[in-house]
Amino acid sequence: MYKKRRIRQYIWCWIFILPTTLFYLGFQGWPILSSIYYSALNWSGISSDKAFVGLGNFKELLSDHWFWNAFANSFKYMLYSVPLLIILSLFLAVLLNEKTLKMREVYRTLFFLPVITTASIVGIIMLFIWSPTGAINGVLRLFGEKQTINFLGQAKLALPTVAVIGVWKDVGIYMIYWLAALQSVPQDVVEAAKIDGAGKWQEFRYITVPIILPIGGVIVLLAVINSLKVFDIVQTMTGGGPFFATDVMGTFVYRTAYASSVGMPRLGYASAAAMLFGICVILIGFVLNTLKSLISKKRVD
């Protein structure tokens, strides 16, 4: 009787997870397997001519200047955006976690709105704001800046500018992550610290930070991986320009696979680039996760 009940429960569990599993296999698993297959082909993705080249695409990538340019820009974007994103989102979370702050829910909603706004809309709006005749230059002129700055037209400024805009768009979701971490701090411990005379800074440094550190490691890991996968905001605002200064791996793969300006698109070559960069991202995620585990273990000991 008990065994039949368990079998029935297992069947119902599989029935409930089957749609999600099929959805994942169709929209995640199959494209990944297809990319592995395509990476071994010399194929445009359009013609019926397919030539098996094995590791030839990967060998060509190692000497491709534009691939390494996009590779480096992806990591530059990460370095520009992740520290600012983590610090700003944590600051907002701490501020909006204060029970004495009025209209906290309203502020949380306002900071979260850019997250649910389509990247194409954000990109179009920001193109106007950061243009030579836009609001940012107008504010700078109020402070005495006489020279107009083309933030998205100068190679040195374009990538940091896009990174700042990316932080503005994504800070809301990481603020929510930090809020969840902060609300996991036991209030009895906080109250005990207050009774012992701990101030706000001491409470945050010696009580809150050690408790939220494991969750913070996960948040940093998510921020790093998501920043390396950036595509939509860059494609919308600059398309990889000017002069490939903002060309990240996402735009490189897209341009190579679907919008090649010289000759036929190269879907096989683009798949190899995506696979190679994907392996690097997985390795980085593994290293960061290992460091997080070591820090958590050391903290427990």
Image: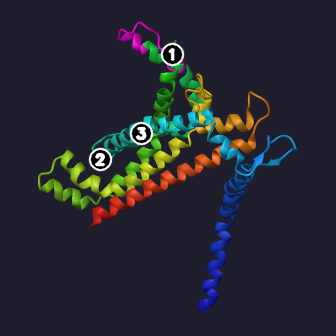
Q: Quadrant of residue 262?
A: top right
Residue in the picture at 17% in, 56% down: 193
Classify mark 2: residues with Cα within 10 Å, few (<14), some (14-19) or many (20+): few
Classify mark 3: residues with Cα within 10 Å, few (<14), some (14-19) or many (20+): many
Front residue of 193/205: it is: 205
121 shown above or below 177: above
Q: Are marks 3 and 1 in contact (CB under 8 Å)?
A: no
- Say which label, 2 or 3, has the lower sequence index: 3
Name the spot of residue 26 as percent of width and height, x first: 72, 57
Q: Is residue 187 left or right of residue 292?
A: left
Q: Is residue 283 left or right of residue 273?
A: left
**Mark number displayed over residue 85:** 3
Name the spot of residue 178 as percent of width and height, x first: 38, 49
Front residue of 68/130: it is: 68
Q: Main secondary structure of the magenta part?
A: loop
Q: Amino acid at mark 3?
A: Leu
Q: Amino acid at mark 2?
A: Lys
The residue tagged 1 is 150
Q: Quadrant of residue 23?
A: bottom right
- 150 drawn magenta: yes
The residue most toward the top is: 146
Q: Is residue 149 left or right of residue 300?
A: right
Q: Quadrant of residue 67?
A: top right
